[in-house]
Amino acid sequence: MMQTLKPPLVSVVIVNYNGLHFLGPCLTSLERLHYPRERYEVILVDNASSDGSIPYVRTQFPWVTIVRNAANLGFAGGNNAGIRAAKGAYLALLNNDTRVDRDWLAALVEVCEADPLVGACTSKILLMKDRLRLRLETDAFTPSGLGVSADSRELGVIVEQAAVRSGDAARPVDFVEGFYGEELVGERRYRWSSGRAILGLPISPDDRALSLVLSVSNPRPSGAPTAPVSLWVGEERIAQFDAAFEPRTYEVPLAEAILRQARQVIQNAGSLLLPDGSGRDRGALVRNGQQSFEENHGQYDRTEEVFALCGAAVLLRRTMLDDVGLLDDEFFMYYEDTDLAWRARLRGWKIMYAPGAVVRHVHCGSSIEWSPLFTFHVLRNRLAMLLKDAPAGMAAREWRQFLLSLLIQGMKLSAHCARGGGRRVTPLWQDVGVRARVARSLMMSLPGLYRKRRTIRGAARVGDEAIMRWICDPDRTVYPSRSKKIT
């Protein structure tokens, strides 16, 4: 808790688009904050919802100020509308699919008040559901060792379906480690395990009766008709079966005592800058093309400076926004937060992380990760951000890489069509279509992006060397030393 007699006024801005099912828990958590009630306001910006969100909030949470947009302005445009209507010296941006801890706001304000150069303070964001680590063990083989192919991977069994069943609902699981990337043969999607692999099962604190549904097969060429599979939670084996050549589906009950072993999962503890200019959640791990998140073991329990903020739950200083500008309205969703952080850093502002500001978040609750819409905005806005903010060499390199990837994918599609494939390879058609849309959008935006670049780079107080020191290894989640030379 803060020790000041009169805490600063804070405006909490929540953008909503057909998120009625999220609003009750989110607004209820804000009602219970350990922060003087007269010192914060909550502004709900509604982006032309059609699900009854506005009548619900007016009835159930009459103390919330509503800003009603005539159209869906996206995350950036919606937040900017809320910021313009806000009265606070600080602006807290909060996703509608979150629940905040009682000390969340006080922890953010305390860090910002301690240093006038702090332009933003980002939260410790945990996934809404905890994770139960389930270990899959089986006999492994190497195709190259058997002389059947050049594949040198250590392979276990094929997993086609993995979900936690709760009544009639199914929750997808995370392939945390020991699994290879997803493979596609016709309409069949699957991934190989190694001999020892970890599944992450999403568990809520109030879960009582769940089961794991697992579809497994053993198409190995070694002649063995089955492969023994054991499932473990900690030191307890909870299931054992023999995987056959053809896929079989197994349903494994998960006792309440097993569920209690689930652990918190970190989605974001500040954001990283990678060598290609992309951002990544500090807490995210990417292995074999599959993203998962770290469990919370206290590894991010220190207040510290980070490269960028996460727009899902962040406190912004109004004077910083007056200095660098609001979120870029042309970033409909995604990368608007990293772009703001980059612009703030070029002006000399600090971005801090407050571990005491804990938020629970439904990751991608308002969008579908790696859907065509998601992919378009991520690809487009990363490149737009670099064209605005980054050193010329980095921006040019990534633009060339993108155009080359579009050319290569287009050639693959042409070859596929020449073989009479038509539109049957949906992922390839979608990928080329999305990349073509990105290229067209950016080409049309180039004059405006160039003008923004001249303004941003011309007003910079900090050189590129200081920014580039934040670049980190994509296989790690720790920052490099700030004192190292940039070569």
Image: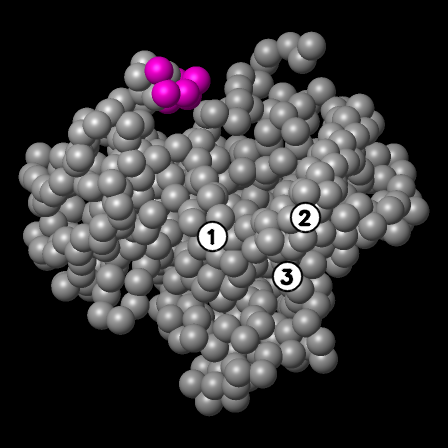
Q: Distance from label 2 to label 1 (Cα)?
A: 18 Å
Which secondary structure lies at badge 3?
A: helix
Which residue lies at the image location 47% right of the left edge and 77% below the top edge?
20
Residue 74 vs 135, above or below: the answer is below
Q: Residues within 10 Å of mark 2 (few under 14, many from 20)?
A: few
Which secondary structure lies at badge 2?
A: loop
Q: Nearer the viewer, residue 106 or 333?
A: 333
Query: What's the mark number on residue 420?
Result: 2
Amino acid type for the residue under numbered disc 2: Gly
Q: Nearer the viewer, residue 54 or 139?
A: 139
Q: Which residue is mark 3?
A: 75
Which residue lies at the image location 59% right of the left edge and 29% below the top edge?
274
Residue 293 vs 468, above or below: the answer is below
Q: Which residue is mark 1?
A: 187
Counting from the top left corner in percent of width and height, residue 371 is at: 57, 55
Q: Distance from label 3 to label 1 (Cα)?
A: 34 Å
For the C terminus, the quadrant is: top right
Residue 199 vs 430, above or below: the answer is above
- Magenta residues span 147-153
Q: Nearer the viewer, residue 423 or 214?
A: 423
Counting from the top left corner in percent of width and height, residue 171 is at: 32, 59
